[in-house]
Image (tube, coloured by chain):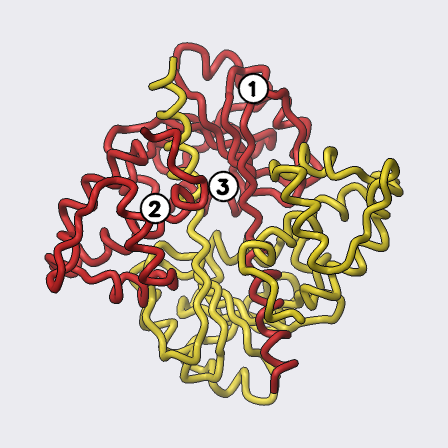
Chain colours: A yellow, B red
Amino acid sequence: MKAKVPVGVIERLPNYLNCLLQLEKQGVDTVSSKRMSYLTGINSAEIRRDLIYFGTFGIKGVGYEVKYLIQKLQHILGSDIQHKIALVGAGNLGSAIAGYDALKKHGFLIDAIFDQDTKKIGTRIGGIIVSDIAEIMEVLSGKNISIAILAVPPAAAQTTANKMVAAGINVILNYTSTIVEVPDLVQVHNSDPVNELLYTLHYLSSQSTKL
Amino acid sequence: MKAKVPVGVIERLPNYLNCLLQLEKQGVDTVSSKRMSYLTGINSAEIRRDLIYFGTFGIKGVGYEVKYLIQKLQHILGSDIQHKIALVGAGNLGSAIAGYDALKKHGFLIDAIFDQDTKKIGTRIGGIIVSDIAEIMEVLSGKNISIAILAVPPAAAQTTANKMVAAGINVILNYTSTIVEVPDLVQVHNSDPVNELLYTLHYLSSQSTKL
């Protein structure tokens, strides 16, 4: 069933899940699609349509049961079980990612950290020793890690991605502004923080045109 | 015309622009939608359809003129002129954002940085003095900044967003995992790095189901 759900729907599920986890923390039991729409910025009709793909969980006049929907979405996304990931780059960005509370919340465990800076190698970030990127193959062997986060300076992105691929990583989350090229069987997801800014900018300039 | 373009199309334009800027740096003059598809991960038919919204720039058998298409996209997105932004949060994440080369490339200039940590206030990040968040109103007054980046710890996200709004910020880029509530006229764009991980996870688990 999973494979038939449109990509756009799957892309929005993490937003719903985040919203629901925050509501749960606030002690909220049920939520309307209207309230979810206000919190996520996603149209309420779209929310209802998206969630129907996974069965109809909403009760008319009551809304969605927060806890139940969280369990459902976590199961659909696969975040109800723990996933080990590797982090490559122990600079400001890497450290920010390693300290990100939401990673743990969604079952992600950083189990290896790499850098090429001798000043960083051997130090600890969140309890994990920073290893030399030159030893990625040895360190990852037997660890069963297939996802890695790329958080190195842009100029080092491609060579680092090559090392990741050689070490058996098949999903790369690229947080650099460099587009990296990898073999067909490896997936790269780009998450450039500037993209959001550019997107926002368009709407700002559309608004000013309308004034 | 801008207002009629679907949101999904606008969302993809920064990806195209990034890809083209990288090709330009590599000295590439023309590019096919197929090559752009390989680099961005977006379907080539979708790329062609998207770009038609802004006029047909592709030449059959030759492709798109890289420099020309960059200019066009920058103009559409509004990144051909400089935009001043404020950064709130001078920790690892804020420092990573401030050092992000792609910001400058797209015409974004961080013109004010705030934090509440007295150890950080008064220090400089990329030449900009870190100001006390308590003084955001005074510091921003007369600066003509309407966009701010929220990069504080999750527990401080809502109170900080309130301060931003009070200081006249009307677009917030939220890099925390907390959903913040703001008045209707203020836009919030959430950019949670974990969303990409969750999205990826779904496809990983779909793959394993298929095996």
Where is residue B110, by image quadrant? top left
Residue bearing mark 1:
B185
For disc 2, the chain is: B
Asked if A84 appears above or below B142 in the picture, the reply is below
Q: What residue did someone put label 2 on?
A: B13
**What secondary structure is marked by label 1?**
loop
Relative height, residue B95 to residue B23 (above, below):
above
For the residues carrying marks 3 and 2, which lies nearer the camera in this image?
2
* Residue drawn at the location 67% of the way across and 38% of the way down: A44
- According to the picture, the residue beneath numbered tag 3 turns out to be B94
Q: Amino acid at mark 1?
A: Leu
Residue B89 shows up from this direction:
no
Q: Are marks 3 and 1 on the same chain?
A: yes
* Disc 3 crowd, CA 10 A, few/some/many (<14, 14-19, 20+): many
Residue at 58% x, 70% y: name it.
B203
Left-right relation of B23 to B79: left
- The residues tagged by marks 3 and 1 sit, at their Cα atoms, a distance apart of 25 Å
If you read the primary sequence from the N terminus, does the residue marked by circle 3 or circle 2 appear first?
2
Q: What amino acid type should be assigned to the residue bearing mark 2?
A: Leu
Q: Is residue A82 above or below residue A35?
A: below
Circle 3: residue type: Gly
Tell whether label 1 touches label 3 (CB within 8 Å). Answer: no
User: Disc 2 to disc 1, how far (Cα)?
Assistant: 25 Å
Dot 1: within a 10 Å radius of its alpha carbon, few (fewer than 14), some, or many (20 or more) residues?
Answer: few
**Mark 3 residue element:** helix
